Amino acid sequence: MITNVLFFSHTGVDDAVALMYASFTKTINIIGIVCSYGGPISLFPLNVTHKAIVTQNMSDSINRVGKVPLFKPIFDVYYDFYKTSMPQLRGAPTHDLLPMMALVNQHMFQWMNRLVHVVTKEGIARGQSIADFRPNTTVELNTIRIAVDLDYRQFYWNFMINMIDKKG
């Protein structure tokens, strides 16, 4: 039996896994993505969230003087995973945290507004998200604000202040 699925989401990191699963199974039919119809929506691609690295030194500082005692044990699990799976990152990315940080720190990102299409038809591209980033692309209605870069210095500063500041 085939199940029709309508995603009510921004197709972020966690939803990418669901989309990939749906792309490789014959029992799920993606019939639409709310990001195609809704707004305003912000999208944080993996190539941007992979830049939001928390290093072992940052974790140690938070553990020593910070206000979040559970951070280090949780971080260590992610750090151990990324240390072996993507050692070039030199830490663990904070994928899920970036959209929350963007609510009050939009200046940390470079943004572009583009239409985003998610391929829902059978074939090799099923589940892929597509946006036209060519310089002369016209911005249309229902565009999605896409983070295209992250200022790591601002990320580092905001992250550490919030994790260590005793006043907050």
Image (tube, helix red, strand yellow):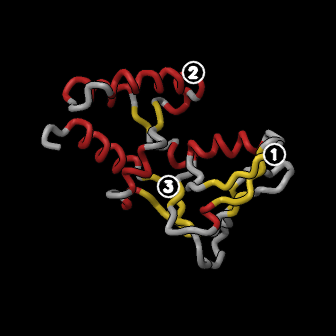
Report the residue marked by disc 3.
149
The N terminus lies in quadrant: top right
Nearer-the-camera pick, 111 or 2: 2
Q: Residue at point 72% right, 39% down? A: 21
Height in image: 110 above or below 127?
below
Q: Which mark is residue 2?
A: 1
Residue 20 image offset from top left, x and y in percent: 71, 42
Q: Position of residue 65 (x, y in %)?
A: 19, 28
Number of numbered labels in the structure image: 3
- Residue 167 position, x and y percent, is 13, 42
Mark 1 and mark 3 in contact (Cβ < 8 Å)?
no
Q: What's the residue type where badge 2 is placed?
A: Thr
Who comes first in sequence, dot 2 or dot 1?
A: 1
Front residue of 122 and 62: 122
Secondary structure category for the residue under label 1: loop
Q: CA distance from mark 3 to mark 1?
A: 38 Å
Residue type beneath disc 3: Asp
Q: Secondary structure at mark 2?
A: helix
Image vertical order of residue 7 relative to residue 25, above or below: below
Q: CA distance from mark 2 to mark 1?
A: 37 Å
Task: Indicate left or right for 40 with 142 as reference.
Answer: left
The residue under label 1 is which amino acid type? Answer: Ile
Element assignment for label 3: strand
Quadrant in the picture for residue 119 = bottom right
Work out which residue is located at the far left of the displayed protein and give it.
167
Give whichever of discs 3 and 1 has the lower sequence position.
1
Task: Tell me which residue sits at (49%, 64%) in the image.
Answer: 111
Q: Nearer the viewer, residue 62 or 88?
A: 62
Mark 2, residue position: 84
Which of discs 2 and 1 lies nearer the camera? The answer is 1
